[in-house]
Image (cartoon, coloured by chain):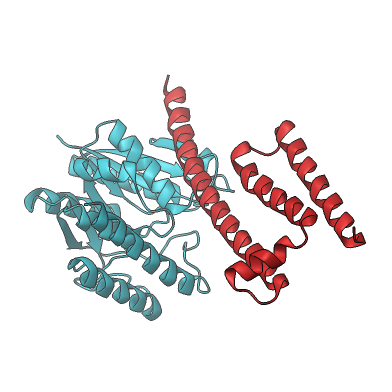
Amino acid sequence: MARIQIIAIAISILFLFYIVRLIIKGKLREEYSIVWIVCTVILVLFSFWRDGLEVVSNLVGILSPPNLVFTAAIFAIFIYLLHLSVVVSKLHSQNKQLAQDIALLKEKMEKK
Amino acid sequence: MNHIAAIVPAYNEEKAITAVVNDILQTAQSQNLSITVIVVNDCSKDSTFEIISKLNCIALDLPVNLGIGGAVQTGFKYAFENGFDYAIQIDGDGQHPASEIPKLINAAKENNLDVVIGSRFISKEGFQSSAVRRMGINYFKWLNRFLVGVTVNDSTSGFRLINKKVLEIVSDYYPDEYPEPEAIILYSLNKLKIGEVSVSMRERQGGVSSIGATSSIYYMFKVSLAIFYTFIRIKFKK
């Protein structure tokens, strides 16, 4: 086993443990952890199965396997960023509604 | 008699707000109108809330800053929940003279309108805004005419009257930032009758415009985008 492979496996597994720990401690909600767990599992998989990268590259027609890594990683990051923008937008509108309800309730309470 | 809510969004308006509220109350008395003033404090950093809670008005205090759209909508929600017949939006900086309120109400009654917009460009009286600002306003006029076929000369005017039917719609959805031009699209796609009356406006009596010089390009871009989104969303829902 090459040195880089051992390092990759170690880091991926550490990362996986860290995510699980965050979920257990309640600092990361389950719905946002799914994408991280999937990504880490893929990382672990390819750390063990070194030829896999080449196999998949050939499969989709990418000549140089590192390009597959970059393309897939950047694509995944874009998708996740978009997902976060959606989450922020949702929080924004919920925040607005809460603030308005608080203002209306405060007024109601003072009237009594 | 119709109950009218005068909604005044206020952000850091400690200098002008007292005069604005008293101006409205005076008009109500002299014209024999039943007007309740609702001031929405949009989490001002100055003493706006302390001042309005001592005035003869409903003081709504937002715990976080929502921007003009969110603040006005809070007033709309109050007016809708409390069964007002009409709501008039009046800026907190003293730009809109309360003496023009009866014009809006009469226009709504006489022509059976759902939305009445006070426009400063019909008879070209009073404060006319800067040349650059007018160019932007003309652009929105063109955009509205192109998309929904409604011509509103002063689409950025915040001096508006809406009736009960519209209150129900805007309590549910009202644009956030810079809501005025976008609201026109919202109204016309909901098949509401929109009219304009000529009013004269003053220069702001205090405070700062919600649109600074540097942000006007952002304003144009953001509002155009919002108008297109609203247009597509409502068009395709049906």
Left or right of B26 on screen, residue A37: right
The residue shown at (43%, 60%) is: B205
The residue shown at (34%, 38%) is: B77
Q: Is residue B25 visible?
A: no
Question: What shade does chain A have?
Answer: red
The residue shown at (26%, 40%) is: B168
For the residue pair B141 and B157, the one nearer the viewer reads as: B141
The residue shown at (77%, 36%) is: A21
Left or right of A90 on screen, residue B144: left
For the residue pair B111 and A68, the one nearer the viewer reads as: A68
Q: Position of residue B214 (x, y in %)?
A: 53, 74
Residue that sits furthest to the right in the current view: A3
Left or right of A39 on screen, residue A84: left
For the residue pair A11 and A19, the one nearer the viewer reads as: A11
Q: Position of residue A76 (x, y in %)?
A: 61, 59
Residue that sits furthest to the left in the current view: B110
Q: Position of residue A35 (x, y in %)?
A: 62, 48
Work out which quarter of the rendered image holds the N terminus of chain B and state it.
Answer: top left
Q: Is residue B163 visible?
A: yes
Question: What shade does chain B have?
Answer: cyan
